[in-house]
Amino acid sequence: MNIQIGDIGHIIQLSIAPVFLLTGVGTFLMVLINRLARIIDRSRVLEDRLDVGYNDTYLNELDTLYRRSHLINVSITLATSCALLICLIIAMLFLDDITNLPLDKYIAGMFVLAMMCLIGSLVSFLREIFIASAAMRSHRHVRQPVE
C-alpha cells in the first residue's frame, strides 16, 4: 500500500469539519464545567450555613442546586460522549481513506449518534437554565423590600 502526499492532504481536508465541531463541543464543555463549579461553590456555602442552623430557605435552594447539578452532569456526560464519537469519526475517516475499508456507513452512524448526544446535552443544559431562571425569579419574590 503506497500512500501519496496528496492522499494525506485529502484525508486532512475530510477531517477539518469534525475538528471544528470538536472545538465547539470543547467550548461548550467549558461552559458546563464553569456552571457546575458555581453550583458546587454555592452548595458548599449553603451547607456551611445549615451546619450553623436549620433554615427551610437554604434547604429549598440546596434541592434546586442538586437538581441543577444533576442536569449539568447529564449534559457533561452527553457532550463528552459526543466529543469521543467525533474523535472516532476522525480516526475512521483516516482509516477509510488509507485502508480502503468500507467504513462510510459506520462513520455516518457515528455522526448521527454524536449529534444525538449533542442534542441531548443541549436539551439537558436548557432544562438546567430554566430551573436556574425559575429559582432566581422565586427568590426575588421571597425577599422583602428594604425600607
Image (cartoon, rainbow, N blue to C red):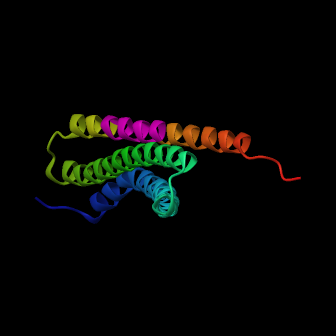
- Comparing 115 with 99, the one in front is 115
Q: Is residue 53 left or right of residue 107?
A: right
- Does the magenta portion include 120? yes
Q: Quadrant of the N terminus?
A: bottom left
Query: What is the count of numbered marks?
Result: 0
Whole-percent x and y of residue 113? 31, 36
Kindly report the secondary structure that dominates the magenta region of the rendered protein.
helix
* Residue placed most toward the observer, 14 or 52: 52
Which residue: 45% across, 59% down?
33
What residue lies at 44% left-to-right and 51% top-to-bottom? 21
Left or right of residue 93, residue 118 in this image: right
Q: Residue furthest left?
A: 1
Name the image quarter holding residue 118: top left
Residue extending farthest front: 53
The answer to whether residue 47 is left or right of residue 83 is right
Image coordinates of residue 79 in percent, x first then y, are: 38, 48
* Percent position of residue 132, x then y: 58, 44
Q: Does the magenta stretch include residue 72?
A: no
The stretch in magenta equals: 112-124
Query: In the image, is 36 to the left or to the right of 94?
Result: right
> Where is 65 relative to 2, above or below?
above
**Observer-nearest residue: 53 or 132?**
53
Work out whether residue 5 or residue 131 is closer to the camera in this orientation and state it: 131
Residue at left offset 34%, top offset 61%: 9
